[in-house]
């Protein structure tokens, strides 16, 4: 039996909610999606929310709504899932990376400031910066927002890990320091809709634009048309959009899951504190938690203190996986992927990301992980690190 690094929790209540939609008239484009949008917007204190079929789609629509296109460049962190970078490429824009703060693994505001200074001189400032709240801990949004004001770029928060997390007393997603925030509802994330994502924003223009692009660029709102509608059948395609819609089946699951979000976060926090205690005497360093942040604990990441170990990072992976512990590595730096190497990125360009990649391990954490399973994980890890 393998303990995975993350897993969904589906209750009888969730199943009943989905089954109810299956028996209804509208499997998609029904009332469930706007209801889910309102609930998420309310939860995270944003004015508007646009539900889509994945966070990847939400990132793409967010970039388009902010006008990203050919000739522009978007910056993100190298320590993220590839989707945080690909969204810029879908728009025909360029992508570049900003090195991380080794303590948190998040995009480093000082490295960002230095890079912006150079970019200003060479006329290559980014149109959008996409900070990623790694593991559920917010980036230093206040610092990044101050730089956005000074250099005139937009901010999309990739909060795929972070629904339910908090920053400086406010919920992640309130968009106090950004234009748009994006959540993922993939089954390994905090709450799930099977596949699914959402973009939240306070600007109604951005939200309307994303809502239109989600469904082919089509509008039925007379206010968005070139003139009065010519008949009751009428709709207009105003832009080239996509079919990125979320179904009502997914929305029903999402609404049901959202009702347990706070309980999920509380259990994840409890497990994280337990890990902190259980790992205290091992030659490992959990990612540092900034006092301004309350993580959603999507992931629990440790760095191996390699210099104190006789076993290699790679060997720890091989051995623990063989023993049924589904440890993971979040993430391979994006620029190391062959596709990005072909674009001219070189390993070694982002030294903190490289060091991080050589040292980190993600330990299993999810609401249904039992205390005794967690004890077993730590025991096996300790044995691997030769420090029983
Ligand atoms: C999971 C994830 C995504 C993509 O989410 P999907 O809903 O699977 O498209 C994007 N960014 C980050 C940081 C993620 O972890």
Image (tube, helix red, strand yellow):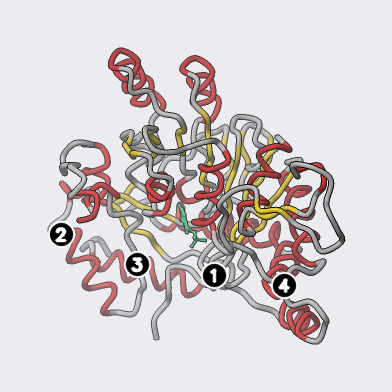
Label 3, on which residue? 327
Label 1, on which residue? 187
- Residue 105's place in the image compared with 29, above or below, is above
Label 4, on which residue? 28
Q: Indicate which disc, 4 or 3, sits on the residue closer to the N terminus.
A: 4
Residue sitting at x 28%, y 49%: 333
Q: Secondary structure at mark 2?
A: loop
How far apart marks 4 and 3 lie (CA) works out to: 37 Å
* Mark 2 Cα-neighbour bin, 10 Å: few <14, some 14–19, many ≥20: some
Q: Are discs 4 and 3 less than 8 Å apart at CB?
A: no
Q: In the image, residue 22 lies at what x, y percent?
A: 75, 84
Q: Indicate which disc, 3 or 2, sits on the residue closer to the N terminus.
A: 2
Q: Indicate which disc, 1 or 3, sits on the residue closer to the N terminus.
A: 1
Q: Indicate which disc, 2 or 1, sits on the residue closer to the N terminus.
A: 1
Q: Indicate which disc, 4 or 2, sits on the residue closer to the N terminus.
A: 4
Label 2, on which residue? 312
Does residue 296 appear left or right of residue 124 in this picture?
A: right
Residue sitting at x 52%, y 33%: 155
Q: Nearer the viewer, mark 3 or mark 2?
A: 3
- The disc at residue 387 is none
Q: Nearer the viewer, mark 4 or mark 3?
A: 4
Residue sitting at x 32%, y 58%: 361
């Amino acid at each position: 039996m393998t303990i995975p690094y993350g897993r969904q929790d589906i209750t009888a209540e969730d199943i009943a909610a989905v089954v109810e939609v299956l028996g209804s008239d509208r499997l998609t484009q029904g009332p469930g999606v706007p209801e889910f949008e309102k609930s998420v917007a309310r939860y995270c204190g944003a004015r508007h929310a646009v539900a889509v079929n994945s966070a990847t789609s939400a990132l793409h629509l967010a970039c388009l709504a902010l006008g990203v296109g050919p000739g522009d460049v978007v910056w993100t962190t190298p320590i993220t899932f590839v989707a945080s970078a690909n969204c810029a490429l879908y728009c025909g824009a360029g992508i570049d990376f900003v090195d991380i703060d080794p303590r948190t693994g998040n995009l480093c505001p000082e490295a960002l400031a230095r890079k912006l200074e150079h970019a200003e001189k060479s006329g290559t400032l980014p149109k959008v910066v996409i900070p990623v709240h790694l593991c559920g801990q917010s980036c230093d949004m206040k610092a990044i927002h101050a730089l956005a004001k000074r250099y005139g770029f937009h901010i999309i928060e990739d909060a795929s890990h972070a629904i339910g997390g908090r920053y400086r007393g406010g919920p992640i997603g309130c968009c106090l320091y950004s234009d748009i925030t994006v959540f993922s509802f993939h089954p390994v994330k905090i709450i799930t809709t099977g596949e699914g994502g959402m973009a939240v924003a306070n600007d109604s223009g951005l939200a309307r634009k994303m809502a239109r692009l989600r469904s082919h660029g089509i509008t039925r709102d007379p206010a968005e048309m070139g003139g009065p509608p010519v008949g009751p059948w009428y709709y207009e395609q105003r832009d080239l959009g996509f079919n990125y819609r979320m179904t009502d089946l997914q929305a029903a699951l999402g609404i049901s899951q959202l009702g347990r979000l706070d309980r999920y976060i509380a259990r994840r926090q409890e497990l994280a504190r337990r890990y902190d205690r259980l790992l205290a005497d091992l030659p490992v360093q959990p990612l540092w938690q900034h006092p301004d942040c309350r993580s959603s604990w999507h992931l629990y990441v440790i760095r191996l203190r390699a210099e104190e170990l006789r076993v290699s990072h790679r060997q720890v992976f091989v051995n623990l996986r063989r023993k049924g512990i589904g440890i993971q590595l979040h993430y391979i730096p994006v620029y190391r992927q062959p596709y990005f190497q072909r674009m001219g990125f070189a390993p070694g360009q982002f030294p903190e990301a490289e060091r991080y990649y050589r040292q980190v391990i993600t330990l299993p954490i999810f609401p249904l992980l039992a205390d005794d399973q967690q004890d077993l994980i730590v025991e096996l890890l300790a044995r691997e690190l030769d420090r029983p």
